[in-house]
Structures are given as C-alpha cells and as structure tokens.
C-alpha cells in the first residue's frame, strides 16, 4: 500500500468512525418503536427486522454513496445527486436528519482536512445550492 493509499484509508476510517465529531447521533432505525408496539416478540422477529433494515439501508444508500464517490470532482453531478436524494427521502424526519448530519459532517471535515473540494461543497450548502445530505 502506498503512503497515499494509507493516508486515504486513515481518513476514511476516521471520518466513518462513530466518534468522529459531527454532532450526529446514533438512532435505532425503528427498532425501539417496533419493540414497544410488540412487533419483536421473538429472537427470530428481531433477526428478521434487523436483516430487513440492513437490506433497506443498503439498497437505498449504497447507490447514492457509489455515485457520489464516482462524481466527487464534478460538483454539478453532486448537486444533481443531492437533489435526487432530497426528493427520495420523503419522510421528513429522515430528510431532516440526513441534511443535519451531512452539514455537520462537511463542517467538521472542512475544519479537519483543509481540502478545497470540501470547502467548495460547504460553500454550496451555505449558498443554498446544495441540501447537504449525508
């Protein structure tokens, strides 16, 4: 592994760590509500719920993440992707959480990494040209 690859890996590990200071919080993804309503009456039902949650998150989020990674230097493509994600998150709670966490993440990443691309994305968010989804 080259030093650039090692540095990229280190940055990825840091920014994806739950302790990275974005001000975001972990949430149960509906697990607590399902339990409180009696939908998780057995370990098999908990397992089914968790598997369905993971499949849903992967099917929804991974295509957006993959395309954002591919398009990173094309800010118009990022803007378009952000608009599609905003329209796709019709649940207002999930939409608001995504933009709050995304904005916090970009703010912290800009302060941490001093990268001009990150700063440009942050400026687009501040100017109202990006929603800033996570």
Image (spheres, grey):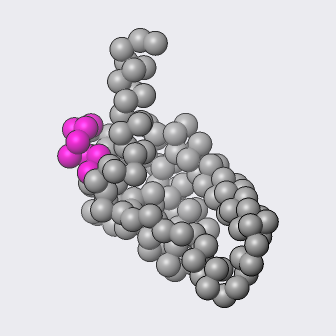
Spot occupied by residue 5 in the image (x, y as percentages of width and height): 42, 20
Res. 2 visible in picture: yes
Q: Residue at x 50, y 78 (%)?
A: 93
Dominant secondary structure, magenta:
helix
Q: Is residue 43 part of the magenta span, yes or no? A: no
Residue 21 shown left or right of residue 66 in the figure: left
Above or below, 94 relative to 23? below
Q: What is the magenta range?
A: 108-115
41 or 115, which is in the foreground? Answer: 41
Above or below, 63 relative to 53? above
Quadrant of the rendered structure where residue 129 is? Answer: bottom left
Q: Residue at x 79, y 66 (%)?
A: 44
Query: Residue pushed farthest top?
Result: 2
Residue 60 shown left or right of residue 105 in the figure: right
Q: Residue at x 45, y 57 (%)?
A: 134
Spot occupied by residue 73 in the image (x, y as percentages of width and height): 43, 37
Quadrant of the rendered structure where residue 103 is? Answer: bottom left
Above or below, 19 relative to 7? below
Query: Residue pushed farthest front?
Result: 42
Spot occupied by residue 27 in the image (x, y as percentages of width and height): 48, 68
85 or 41, which is in the foreground? Answer: 41
40 or 3, which is in the foreground? Answer: 40
- Label count reads 0
Above or below, 9 relative to 111? above
Q: Residue at x 58, y 62 (%)?
A: 84
């Amino acid at each position: 592994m080259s030093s650039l690859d090692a540095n990229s890996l280190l940055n990825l590990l840091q920014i994806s760590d739950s302790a990275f200071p974005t001000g975001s919080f972990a949430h149960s993804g509906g697990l607590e509500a399902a339990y409180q309503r009696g939908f998780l009456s057995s370990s098999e039902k908990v397992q089914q719920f968790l598997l369905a949650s993971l499949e849903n998150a992967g099917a929804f989020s991974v295509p957006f993440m993959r395309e954002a990674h591919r398009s990173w230097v094309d800010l118009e493509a990022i803007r378009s992707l952000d608009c599609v994600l905003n329209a796709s998150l019709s649940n207002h709670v999930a939409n608001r959480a995504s933009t709050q966490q995304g904005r916090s993440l970009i703010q912290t990443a800009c302060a941490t990494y001093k990268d001009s691309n990150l700063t440009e994305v942050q400026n687009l968010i501040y100017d109202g040209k990006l929603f800033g989804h996570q």
